[in-house]
Amino acid sequence: MSVEIDYTADGYHPTDNPLKTGIAGRCPRCQTGHLFKGYLTLAPRCEICGLDYGFADPADGPAFFAMSIVAVPALAFAVWFQMRFETPLWLHLITTVPLTLGASLALLRPLKGWLVCSQFFFKAEEGRLVRAREKAER
Ligand SMILES: [Zn+2]
């Protein structure tokens, strides 16, 4: 499935900073509309400029980055907490586990926004083969 994106809609200046726009959860084209309709659910389209978010498919990217960012500090905290206080295992269930889950959940939305805005900014789409005939028609 291919979704055509109108990158040059009149009156809008697409973002030049997908990180900033994505973290704010704003539309990459008008930078005013909302990207999300829930915590992690993308809106079907921008309510201001009408950009169809059908092109957006960050897949597992936000989860991968959230896990990668949170894992090392969480493990370091768990080891430090264990070595420093010689805590029983159940204490990690009310300290390390909620800390890890909370940090991961807090990062998911801004990371997803960043990836969707980057996808728009870099005009990223699924790769496809261009046959010789199509090339000649261009
Ligand atoms: Zn918009």
Image: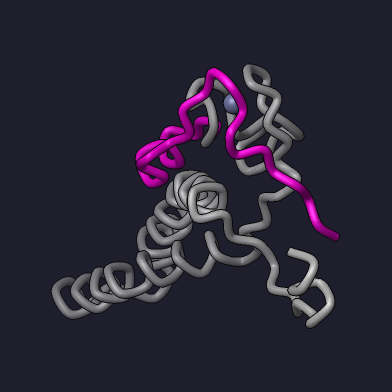
Q: In the displayed image of the protein, which residue is found farthest to the front?
A: 136
> Does the stretch in magenta take in 125?
no
Q: Which residues make up the magenta segment?
A: 1-27
Say which of 21 and 100 sits in front.
21
| Left or right: where 97 falls relative to 34 | left
Say which of 106 and 14 sits in front.
14
Q: Position of residue 41 (x, y in %)?
A: 69, 41
Say which of 46 and 11 sits in front.
11
| Left or right: where 58 falls relative to 98 | right
Give me the residue at 24% from left, 76% from top.
82
**In which image quadrant can residue 94 be found?**
bottom left
**In which image quadrant can residue 136 be found?**
bottom right
Give me the residue at 32% from left, 68% from top.
74
Above or below, 103 against 136 in this view is above
Q: Position of residue 14 (x, y in %)?
A: 48, 34
Q: Main secondary structure of the magenta part?
A: loop
Q: Quadrant of ligand 1?
A: top right
Above or below, 78 against 114 in this view is below
**In which image quadrant can residue 124 be found?**
bottom right
Give me the residue at 45% from left, 66% from top.
65
Give me the residue at 66% from left, 50% from top.
56
Q: In the displayed image of the protein, which residue is found farthest to the left?
A: 84
Above or below, 28 against 62 in this view is above
Q: Quadrant of the C terminus?
A: bottom right
> Does the stretch in magenta take in 7?
yes
Q: How is the image coloured?
A: one colour
Say which of 16 and 20 sits in front.
16
| Left or right: where 27 falls relative to 128 | left
